[in-house]
Image (tube, helix red, strand yellow):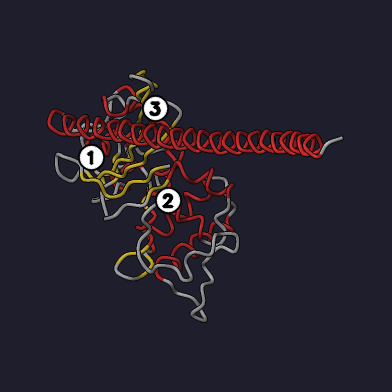
Amino acid sequence: MSARCVDSSRFAKLRRRNRGTAVIMAILTVALVATLAASVVRQYGANVMSLTGRHDQDQARWLARGAVDWARNVLANDARTSATDHAGEAWATKVPATPVDNGEVSGEVDDLSGRFDLNSVVRNGAADPSNLAAYKRLLKFSGIDDDRADDLATALVAWILRTTADGANSALSTSAPQVLQLPPQTPLVDVDELQLIEGYDKDVMVNLRRFVAAHPAASALNLNTVSAEVLAALMPDLGIGVTRVLVEERLRAPFKDVNDFVARSHRSSHAPKTGLAVVSRYFLVSGRARYGESTTRMLVLLDRQNQWSEIIWQKIL
C-alpha cells in the first residue's frame, strides 16, 4: 500500500473524529443555550408574576381605602343631618361584598363610643377607683371569675402606669412577643395591646373584645349603642336585667337625649351626671377588598370630634 493511501485513510479517520467532536460540541452548545433561555424565561415569568402581584395588591389597597373614605363621607353626612347616633342609621349598615372591575369591596363601621374605654381605668396619673371597679364588673360579665378579674384589672393599671414592685416588667405577658421591654407608660392605642399584658390570653380576648375599646381621649358613652353589659358595669344600681330591657326598647325608639334615657330607666337618682351622650365620637372602620389575586383588609380608627372624621391610626392586614 502506498504512503498516499495510508495518509488518506488517516486523514479520513481524523476528519470523522473531528466531525463527531463538533457534533457533540454543537449539541452541548444547544443544550447550554436552551438551559440559559429557559432560565431567562422562568425569571421573566417570575418577574411578570411579581409585578402582577404587586399591582393587584396596590389596587386592592386602594379599593379598601375607598371603603374607608366612603365611611368618612357617610359619617360626615350623618353628623350634618342627625342629632343622635344609633344602630338604625346608614353608617351602621354593613356593606356586603360588592363586585367591582376585576374584584370586590366591602366594609363596616363599629361604634367605639358605645364600648368601655380601657384607658379610663387611669386618670391623672393614678388608678381611677370608679372606672376600675366598673372594669372589674365588666370582666365578670365576660365570664371571668372574681379573683382573676381583680388580677386582670390590676395588670392593666400597671401596664398603663408601669408601676411594679421591683421596676421590672411584671405586667408583660410571658406568652407575648418580646417586642416591648417595658410597658409604655401611656394609654393603650389599640385593644390588641392587651395581648401583651400578663393574663390576657386568647379566651379572655375573645370574650372581652366586643365590650371594650381604647379611646385616644376621654369621651362620652353613647347610650344608643352601648351594650347591656357595659351599661350595667358602669351603672351597677340599674342591674343587668334593667339594662337589657333598655337595650331592647331603644331598638324601637332610640334615646333622644340623656334626659330621655334617665326618664325611661326609672332610676334618675342613679344616673351619672356627666359622661353620657346619644352621639358618638370614635368609630372603627373595616374595609376589605379583593383585586385579581390579592386581598387586603384595612382597619382605621376615626375621631369625629368635628364633622369630618380625622384618621387616628390605620392598619393593613
Looking at the image, residue 92 lies above or below residue 120: above
Q: CA distance from mark 2 to mark 3?
A: 29 Å
Identity of the amino acid at label 1? Val
Whether residue 173 is visible here, answered yes or no, is yes
Residue underneath mark 1: 258
Please report whichever mark, 2 or 1, sits nearer to the chain's N-terminal start: 2
Q: CA distance from mark 3 to mark 1?
A: 45 Å
Q: Residue at x 26, y 25 (%)?
A: 89
Whether residue 254 sits left or right of residue 171 in the image: it is left
Q: Position of residue 72 (x, y in %)?
A: 22, 35
Whether residue 284 sits left or right of residue 155 in the image: it is left
Disc ID at residue 191:
2
Mark 1 surroundings within 10 Å by alpha-carbon count, few (fewer than 14), some (14 through 19), many (20 or more)? some
Q: Residue at x 49, y 76 (%)?
A: 164
Disc ID at residue 17:
none
Q: Quadrant of the C terminus?
A: top left
- Give the quarter of the image for residue 283: top left
Looking at the image, residue 249 lies above or below residue 6: above
Q: Position of residue 44 (x, y in %)?
A: 46, 35
| Front: mark 2 or 3 | 3
Identity of the amino acid at label 2? Val
Please report whichever mark, 2 or 3, sits nearer to the chain's N-terminal start: 2
Looking at the image, residue 88 lies above or below residue 126: above
Q: Residue at x 39, y 54 (%)?
A: 118
Identity of the amino acid at label 3? Tyr
Q: Nearer the viewer, residue 10 or 140?
A: 10
Q: Position of residue 271 (x, y in %)?
A: 30, 46
Residue underneath mark 3: 291
Whether residue 206 sits left or right of residue 135 in the image: it is right
Tell whether label 3 touches label 2 (CB within 8 Å): no
Q: Nearer the viewer, residue 90 or 108?
A: 108
Q: Quadrant of the N terminus?
A: top right
